[in-house]
């Protein structure tokens, strides 16, 4: 009898396969027989244990991070970075080349919002995730780096007497 974890892992495997429009037979054909339909099906049902190495190979075949195949807890899907507040004066005056994309992004957001207060700009969680992709890091890693560079406002309410 499969454990709950094995069933959850299998459900993730099935969901990824189906998102890619593949049947079990399609996986076997696309992989040139490397992944047998019966084996992948048994992984998906939780009837057969998958090793870490095989899971990594399957993730590579599906072209997804291994963490995306793990139930509950793997991957950046679970990371919940909220919005951040950029100190625009620090950002625009900073000499680090690595901040140039953020400065361009911030200007674009200001333009889109018509928000030119000049002091701070809140970056929503979705914007932060997009920037993290550009920087090839996690949202929390990006927040940490921005903190190190001194371009984040720790308590934006303090700026406005709130």
Image: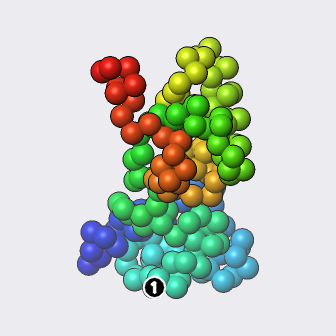
For the residue pair 16 and 142, the one nearer the viewer reads as 142
Q: Give the left or right position of residue 31, taking residue 145 as reference.
A: right
Residue 153 in percent (x, y) is at 44, 36
As helix, strand or loop, the secondary structure at mark 1 comes to: loop
In which quadrant of the rendered image does the C terminus lie? top left
Residue 126 in percent (x, y) is at 52, 38
Residue in the image at 55% along x and 17% along y = 117
Vertical comparison of 154 with 136: above or below:
above
Residue in the image at 65% along x and 37% along y = 93
Q: Residues within 10 Å of mark 1 (few under 14, many from 20)?
A: few
Residue 38 in percent (x, y) is at 53, 79
Q: Give the left or right position of residue 161, taking residue 122 as reference.
A: left
For the residue pair 84 and 9, the one nearer the viewer reads as 84
Q: Which residue is mark 1?
A: 51
Res. 39 visible in picture: no
Residue 77 in percent (x, y) is at 45, 53
- Most extreme residue toward the top, as rendered? 114
Residue in the image at 52% along x and 35% along y = 86
Total numbered labels: 1
Vertical comparison of 1 with 156: above or below:
below
Colouring mode (rainbow / by chain / secondary structure / one colour): rainbow
Which quarter of the picture shows residue 26? Answer: bottom right
For the residue pair 155 and 80, the one nearer the viewer reads as 155
Q: Give the left or right position of residue 154, taking residue 54 as reference.
A: left
For the residue pair 105 and 45, the one nearer the viewer reads as 105
In which quadrant of the rendered image does the N terminus lie? bottom left
Res. 95 visible in picture: yes
Residue in the image at 40% along x and 53% along y = 78
């Amino acid at each position: 009898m499969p454990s709950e974890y094995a069933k959850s892992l299998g459900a993730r495997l099935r969901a990824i396969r189906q998102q890619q429009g593949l049947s079990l037979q399609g996986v076997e054909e696309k992989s040139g027989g490397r992944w047998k339909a019966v084996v992948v099906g048994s992984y998906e049902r939780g009837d057969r244990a998958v090793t870490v190495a095989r899971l990594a190979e399957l993730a590579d075949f599906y072209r997804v991070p291994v963490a995306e195949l793990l139930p509950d807890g793997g991957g950046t899907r679970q990371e919940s970075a909220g919005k951040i507040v950029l100190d625009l004066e620090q950002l625009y005056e900073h000499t680090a080349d690595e901040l140039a994309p953020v400065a361009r992004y911030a200007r674009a957001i200001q333009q889109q919002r018509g928000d030119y207060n000049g002091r701070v700009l809140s970056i929503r969680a979705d914007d932060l995730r997009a920037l993290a992709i550009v920087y090839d890091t996690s949202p929390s890693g990006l927040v940490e780096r921005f903190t190190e560079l001194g371009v984040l406002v720790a308590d934006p309410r303090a700026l406005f007497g709130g």
